[in-house]
Image: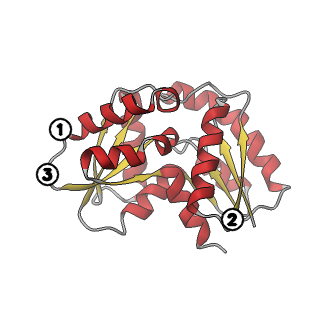
Amino acid sequence: MKVILINPNSTEAMTVSSVEAAQAAEPEIEFVGWTSREGPRSIQGPEDGERAIGPLLELVNKAVAEKPLAVILGCFDDTGLQQAKQICKCPVLGIGEASFVLSSLYSSQTAVITTVKEAVPIIKNNIANLGYQNNVTDVIAADVEVLELEYNQNGSAMKFAQASESLNPNIKNIILGCAGAVNIKDEFERLTGYTAFDGVTSAAKLCRSLL
């Protein structure tokens, strides 16, 4: 069965790393990556998100004809997610929502560490709208540009680890709030000892339940 993973930004490297992570998480499923060529190079706040929605939904419409098992939208802000769900008959998974679902199955409180401060209000709003505010209690930014997660992975992991030092001790689980965080998850866990979730792997694991 095929799952189409749509990257709403135009950076092909992020599509490749996302598909590789999804495929590694669930090898029984075929993950196919599509890049939104007309989207912004990265999505770092509401303006980028608005620019991304039109080209993204064009790809979602195209995906309908492929009759996939599911569609994954590879932006942690869940850009265009509600509109995409109205278009598709198959399940549509936003990687932000997927990480909230999966992390809620674990004990103790969870925090999101995202890239830039502009994303924090969007993520907080998504958490509240989905009803996960009792599980996902904190959202902070590591002040890391989205594309740094592709091209400076060790440095990005260190900045995310440093950001985690400001969290309260009740936090035991960390959601890494960007599609590119698949590149730093293992190193972040090694540096911090937290249980970490990334949205792409979370979405892939939820797709497994659809088989």
Report the residue that reaches farthest toward the right.
65
Q: Earlier in the sequence, mark 1 or mark 2?
A: 2
Q: Earlier in the sequence, mark 2 or mark 3?
A: 2
Q: Report which residue position mark 1 lands on.
A: 166
Total marks placed? 3
Secondary element at tag 3: loop
Secondary element at tag 1: loop
Q: Amino acid at mark 2?
A: Ile
Residue at (45, 56) in percent of width and height:
99
Residue at (37, 69) in percent of width and height:
105
Question: Can you say whether 23 is above or below 183 in the image?
Answer: below
Q: Quadrant of the C terminus?
A: bottom right
Q: Report which residue position mark 3 lands on.
A: 169
Question: Can you say whether 165 is above or below 86 in the image?
Answer: above
Front one among 24 and 113: 24
**Mark 3 burial class by Cα count in 10 Å: few <14, some 14-19, many 20+:** few
**Mark 1 burial class by Cα count in 10 Å: few <14, some 14-19, many 20+:** few
Q: Amino acid at mark 3?
A: Pro
Compute the Cα span from label 2 to label 3.
38 Å
Question: Can you say whether 142 is above or below 200 in the image?
Answer: above
Report the residue that reaches farthest toward the left.
169
Whether residue 73 is visible, yes or no, is: no
Q: Position of residue 44 (x, y in %)?
A: 48, 28
Q: Is 172 situated left or right of 120 in this image?
A: left
Q: Amino acid at mark 1?
A: Ser
Whether residue 99 is visible, yes or no, is: yes
In the rendering, which numbered label is found on residue 29? 2
Q: Is 15 situated left or right of 167 in this image?
A: right
Compute the Cα span from label 3 to label 1.
9 Å
